[in-house]
Image (tube, grey):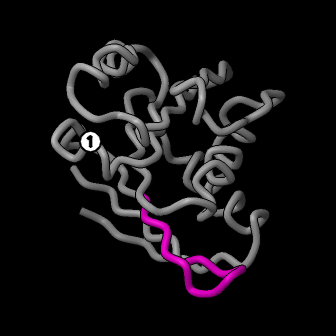
Amino acid sequence: MTTETYTSKSPEETEEIARNLAKKLKSGDFIAFFGGLGMGKTNFVRGLASVLCPDVRVTSPTFALVNEYIGNLNIYHFDMYRITDSDDLYSTGFYEYLERPGIVAAEWCEMIPEDLPEDRYNITFERISESERRITIEHIF
């Protein structure tokens, strides 16, 4: 396991941290996001997409449950907030997306801890102040 910790003072800094990670990603990678509302998870995905799927518009998947961003390396962006059991997870097509080329980036992984792949990136957001976040990236393999 490797761990890196960053401090972000703005959405732009969060996106920059994500752009640096995006350069290391490969098809089949899974990104599990942890952290509350308004912490910067979607901004992080926006940074990933700016490198991997230029020209796409990234939005929160809150109502769609999954947004697909097609590019050099596709991103499948999930929101697990409303997932309550394995049946809910199955109905999103989650397991099928794990087999598709691209990466899966899932917000609210607190809701699905037993369903996370063993090899993954855990990205945890912690509020330091109103405008400052600690972002910890753990690569578990």
Asked whether, in this view, residue 92 is left or right of residue 134, the answer is left
Residue at 70 percent of width and 57 percent of height: 15
Q: Which span is picked out in magenta?
A: 123-133
Residue at 49 percent of width and 41 percent of height: 25
Does the magenta-highlighted stretch encompass residue 131? yes
Q: Residues within 10 Å of mark 1 (few under 14, many from 20)?
A: some
Residue at the far right: name it.
55
Residue at 73 percent of width and 68 percent of height: 13
Q: Residue 93, located in which quarter of the rendered image?
A: top left
Name the main secondary structure of what is drawn in magenta.
strand
Residue 10 percent across, percent down from the top left: 76, 72
Residue 79 percent across, percent down from the top left: 49, 37
Residue 107 percent across, percent down from the top left: 47, 45
Mark 1, secondary structure of its residue:
loop
Asked whether, in this view, residue 137 is left or right of residue 111, the answer is right
**Quarter the N terminus occupies:** bottom left
Q: Nearer the viewer, residue 75 or 141?
A: 75
Q: Residue 138, located in which quarter of the rendered image?
A: bottom left
Q: Residue 3, located in which quarter of the rendered image?
A: bottom left
Residue carrying label 1: 112
Asked whether, in this view, residue 17 is left or right of residue 113, the answer is right
Q: Nearer the viewer, residue 60 or 23?
A: 60
Does the magenta-highlighted stretch encompass residue 17? no
Residue 46 percent across, percent down from the top left: 70, 45
Asked whether, in this view, residue 122 is left or right of residue 26, the answer is left
Q: Amino acid at mark 1?
A: Ile
Q: Is residue 136 above or below residue 81?
A: below
Residue at the far bottom: name it.
129
Q: Is residue 33 above or below residue 131?
A: above
Residue at 68 percent of width and 21 percent of height: 71
